[in-house]
Amino acid sequence: MRTLGTNASIDLGAEQLIGANNDSTIIAIEIKSFIGPSLVYDFHLALGQYMNYKRASLQNDPERLLYLAVTNSVYEIFFLKPDVMDAVQTFQLNLIVFDDATEKIVHWLIQ
């Protein structure tokens, strides 16, 4: 994917961009661990990265739907806060919430 004049090759261990098909929808998933010392800082980084990928995706692959994936525990302790919920809606973040123990998707949240 080309972003900001560079080729973005994402391979950051547990944080990676995954392309997949969900029925007839083509999706990309950015998985974030939120293991830094500050959930707010991790959210700012994830939001900036998501917005940049979204912009690049609209130019390069407009049919692909982008998701930010987070664990259920991070979703429950952070993403359900009113300010964060407002940011998710304002910036139209599509979320996948997964159980990291079972690796199963708990929620698909499309804005």
Image (cartoon, rainbow, N blue to C red):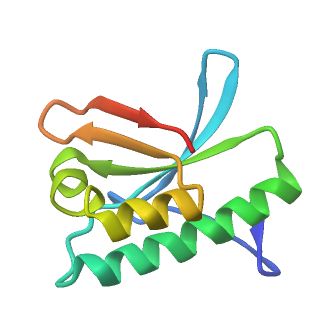
Q: Residue at 26% across / 63% down in the picture?
A: 81
Image side of residue 106 versus residue 26, left or right: left
Q: Position of residue 49 (x, y in %)?
A: 55, 72
As drawn, 42 above or below 101: below
* Residue located farthest toward the top when viewing the structure as drawn: 23
Locate the N terminus by quadrant.
bottom right
Residue 89 percent location from the top left of the image? 52, 57
Question: Measured along the vertical axis of the image, is residue 50 above or below residue 62?
Answer: below
Residue 77 rendering spot, x and y as whole percentages: 15, 59
- Quadrant of residue 10 in the image? bottom right
82 sits to left or right of 28: left
**Residue sitting nearer the eye, 76 or 56:** 76
- Residue 78 falls in image quadrant: bottom left
In the displayed structure image, the side of residue 14 where residue 44 appears, left or right: right
Q: Nearer the viewer, residue 16 or 82?
A: 82
Q: How many marks?
A: 0
